[in-house]
Amino acid sequence: MADTRATAAIGGLTALLLVGALAVQAGFVPTPWADQYGEATVTISDESGERLAVVQTEVADTNRERRIGLSKHDSLDDGHGMLFVHDSEGQHTYIMPNMSFGIDIVYVGSDKRINEIHEARKPGPNEDGGSMEYPGRGKYVLEVPKGYMADNNVTEGDRIEIEYHGNGS
């Protein structure tokens, strides 16, 4: 009888640890190091190699970090942004929940070529931003202040280079 209880307790504990590990891995449960975004410098150049812009970014490379994104920021200075890194190139849709400012959403392929640029406005007073959808294809998504890409003559087909610092991807 005691052996059965011990076996059941060990089995239950093992199952609990496995579920907990999977929840952390999937980004559903914060870890002690959650929200400690890495940093990277993103340099944008045109097809001839002329440098168009340099952006200092936070790197969101976990499900949790990508889900939160810039929503905890009150503003974003020119030359600053967030770089979202996905495991592989694919179709993604970014939304604007809890955003207090407009942004450019820039989809970049695994070849580091810009595929699509959206100018996403700030959600209105009666909008939560969750229904404001901006789809695109990429492995990377760069978010910068709204109008920054146009102000720096960045267009689809331009390329990025990424230099990671600290705990970035």
Image (cartoon, rainbow, N blue to C red):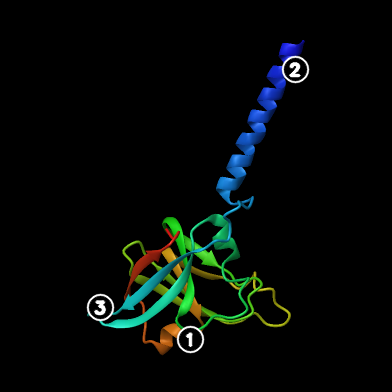
The part of the image, by quadrant, that contains residue 79 is bottom left
Residue at disc 1, secondary structure: loop
| Left or right for 66, reference 86 | right
Q: Amino acid at mark 2?
A: Arg
Q: Mark 1 to mark 2: distance in Å?
A: 64 Å
In the foreground, 70 or 47: 70
Residue shown at the point (42%, 64%) measured from the top left: 140
Of labels 2 and 3, the one closer to you: 2
Q: Which residue is under mark 1?
A: 147
Q: Mark 1 to mark 3: distance in Å?
A: 21 Å
The answer to whether residue 110 of the structure is visible from this angle is: yes
Query: Residue 28 appears at what percent x and percent y?
Result: 63, 51
Q: Amino acid at mark 3?
A: Glu
Residue at disc 2, secondary structure: helix
Residue shown at the point (34%, 77%) measured from the top left: 44
Residue at disc 3, secondary structure: loop
Query: Residue 38 appears at what percent x and percent y?
Result: 47, 63
Q: Residues within 10 Å of mark 3 (few under 14, many from 20)?
A: few
Q: Of the numbered discs in the image, which one, if any, rests on residue 5? A: 2
Q: Is residue 26 above or below residue 136?
A: above
The part of the image, by quadrant, that contains residue 128 is bottom right
The answer to whether residue 138 of the structure is visible from this angle is: no
Q: Of the numbered discs in the image, which one, if any, rests on residue 47? A: 3
